Amino acid sequence: MPVAEGKWLVMDLLEREAVLQDLTGHLRAAVVGPGRLALVRGEAGIGKTSVVNRLAQLADPGIRILAGACDPLAAPRSLGPLMDLAPRLGQAVRGALTGALAGTCRPDEVFDCLLADLSSYPSLLVMEDVHWADEATMDLLRYVARRLPSVPTLVVTTYRDDEIGRTHKVTALLGTLAGYPWVDRHDLTPLSRPAVARLARGHTVDADELYEVSGGNPFIVTEVLTAPTEAIPATVREAVAGRLAGLSAAARRVVDTLAVLGRRVPLPVLSDLLPASEEALDEAVASGIVRTDGQLSEFRHELTRLAVLDCVPAAHRLRMHRQVLAAKRSRPVTADDLTLLAEHADGAGDPGAVLEYAPAAAAHALASGAPREAAVQYARALRYADLLPLSRKASLLEGHSLACLASSRLDEGIASRRTAVELRRALGDRLREGDDLRWLSCWLWPSGRTVEAGRTGLEAVRVLEGLEPSRELARAYLNLCQLACRGHEEPVVTAACAEKAIALGERFGDTGVVVQARFHAAVADMLGSGSGWEECEQAVSGAMGQVPPEDAGFLAFVMCFFTALRRDTSRMTAAVDRAEAHCRDHDLLPHLLCTRAWGSWGLLNRGLWAQAADAAQRVLSHPGSPPVVRALASTVLGLVRARQGNGQAWPLLERAAGLVDSGCLLDTGLGWEARVEAAWLGGDPERGQAEARSGLDALAERTHPWLSGPLACWIRRTGGTPPQVPAAGPYALELAGDWRGAAAQWDSLGCPYEAALVRLSGDAPALHQALAAFEELGARPVVARTRAVMRAQGVRPVRRGPRRATLANPYGLTIREMDVLKLLDESLTDAEIAARLYITPKTAGHHVGSVMAKLGVHSRQEAARRLHDPKL
């Protein structure tokens, strides 16, 4: 498809480092002789233009850059690429080219003049899109390629290998070049899933879905990110339409039929529907829009298929769906057929067939670990569910809710579960009504509706307690235990709920209930008394092999939450690593997003602010992040900005407060603390005290010394008199006036910023130590405040040499310069580096210049390569 591949230059040029390294090596070798030819090939939109443009940027200033391109014209320009680059060639070549076009000069005379010109200057000659070249240009390439060893030139040609068939003129050219040892071939492949996810950072799109629909094609990825609200971006739609316009009517019928049939179509199925379609299929393949793999045919990209399908006449779609449905139902149906049968049944407008196959396809997808596909199939069945008895409709709603929750589509899942509760109540099915209420309560908490979660959880227990003891009642008690623990109720409340859950869990052999209840009881005790870490760790480790993966994943990410609350960075790091690995291994997306949010909090506590902000932004960019998770990530990002003096902290903190209800302790905990600190950093201590007292009011009925302690300390720091509230660890020491003990504890916990804050109340050496720490962290507002405190106390700042981290670096790079170097390794521009580090582009430019000077390199790419030097 004709696309502006160069548009990709504004984004990261990912997974092209090896090709660029090879090409720059060819260029260095070619300009000193002998010359070389590089063939760069790949499908449309794969980034060929971006690669050659970057190669030109990397070229030595003494190398002449000559660039021309072929065009998709009905009658290609004779020697079109040579006409593009003629202004940069000598007079002899220009004169010969003019004569050749006028018919007064033979083409081979032009070739001779070009070769003589290339012999005079070290050159990079680029000819793009030679799949559209005229015969004269192909002859020029043959002529120059054979004589390249005699000229100091690298010739780079690009072409779409998805558009050349057995008889294409490029295929003939490749045969001519096959025996030349100075010809190199470079394939550009689609981006990997991690690369697509990296490009999607900062955009509210599902990176996995983006990868699936784009197939890793950089052009499609870029266009979707540019227009995320469009199901099919206009540019993609237009590119597909342009390619379809060149097909014959027979080939267009093949393409339309393949679009209706689905992703991977067996060729015999296509032949049954379109007899004698082999030649038309070959034409469609040669156009690059579809491809064949053995006995299967498919579109190169799912988004391309959807764009084609969108243009297929409704009558044709209906006829094809009905034909395929009838054909497939006439043969034995396997589990792998269910999804396609459901799709064709839906397309054929056959409600009975949809209700036969869609629920089965959904159940199969859910059992196979594909909750997103399961949710789609349940939703398809629900469109026809009014034809079913209420009990079957309720079952579909329950399945849809479970699939939505597993794929982090929280609002849809909650809505379906609410309707299921109503239907079960209408049916008088009290057992399933109670279980649905329990499920609803479980997922109301991450949606930020903690008050409703508690109320619904109690209602679930009330309904189920009116029946015989059951496994469902055990789970309902466990839910109350979890809510009490996360809500920081008195440990005795959590323990009472846990005891009931354990008793029923053991009675019905539900190990998951027993393990989780014991874990939450231990956590509640640990948060109050500080003891019991080992029991909690043993419970999580034991759960990994005893209970279902989703239950073990829940315990793993909850452990991240509670280690973050206690600011224990070493335990937090280990907990996050364990939870991330488990969630990735078992495709637990909601659990993974929660883990990453709490992981960003841990990075913040460790003083790794750039990494914390990046991790928080990744969570915010994922459309499936629940409100509680988004609130935490927004708070972390707001705190980073406040501490760095960015000035854009409050919008994020206000957004966080608006995402959850006032009963959510993530908001009234870290959220209130962040608001107090932001007010203090902004020079508004009165607002800081007011925010702190509001937070303590919200905590009045709960006992959590790791939440009330910091708020009391902030009241003290802002000049107020804090109330008597429970305080833990370093907070208790600070409130007692023991700044040395508090700072030492913060140091042992691995929290440098908090330790430095405490030292602001200390003596002259403590102030010097605090100032050094704040400068190291880049905490500009607190640096200024610390200097003011020192001046007021008559303490003179000590002019320091390089910091310890700088002295330890073999190149003398500071921590901030190392951050910049790592981002250079990602091929980021100054503006992109500035956005990542929350600094101005001008400051980022200064840092880049300093890094290059210290490393003794002359380009950003050389600097990035030094990152992998063992000495760094």
Image (spheres, rainbow, N blue to C red):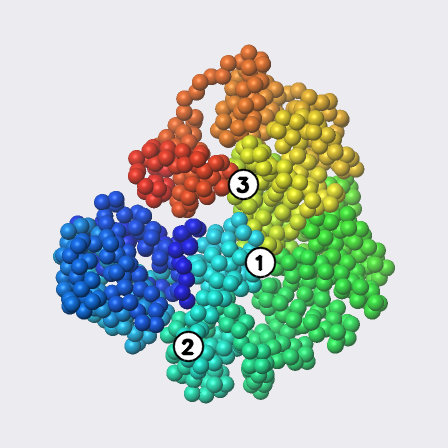
Q: What kind of element bears circle 1?
A: loop
- The answer to whether any part of residue 806 appears in the image is yes
Above or below, 111 against 582 in this view is below
Where is mark 3, residue-wise? 612
Residue at (44% x, 81% y) in the render: 249
Image-quadrant location for residue 814: top left
Q: On the rendered image, what quadrant is the N terminus found in?
A: bottom left
Q: What kind of element bears circle 2?
A: loop
Mark 3 to mark 2 CA distance (whole Å): 51 Å
Residue at (30% x, 39% y) in the render: 858
Residue at (74% x, 71% y) in the render: 393
In this view, the residue in front, 669 or 26, is 26
- The answer to whether any part of residue 174 appears in the image is no
Q: How many marks?
A: 3
Q: Amino acid under label 3?
A: Ala
Q: On the rendered image, what quadrant is the C terminus found in?
A: top left
Mark 1 to mark 2 CA distance (whole Å): 30 Å
Say whether residue 343 is left or right of residue 720.
Answer: left
In this view, the residue in front, 841 or 99, is 99
Above or below, 644 against 544 in this view is above
Mark 1 and mark 2 lie on one chain; the one further toward the N terminus is: 1
Judge the density around disc 2: few (<14), some (14-19), many (≥20) Cα neighbours within 10 Å.
some
In this view, the residue in front, 428 or 92, is 92
Above or below, 759 against 343 in this view is above
Say whether residue 434 is left or right of residue 709.
Answer: right
Instruction: Point out the frontmost of discs 3 and 1.
Output: 1
Judge the density around disc 1: few (<14), some (14-19), many (≥20) Cα neighbours within 10 Å.
few
Instruction: Point out the frontmost of discs 3 and 2.
Output: 2
Where is mark 1, residue-wise? 229
Where is mark 2, residue-wise? 247
Mark 3 to mark 1 CA distance (whole Å): 28 Å
Residue 213's x, y, as percent? 51, 64
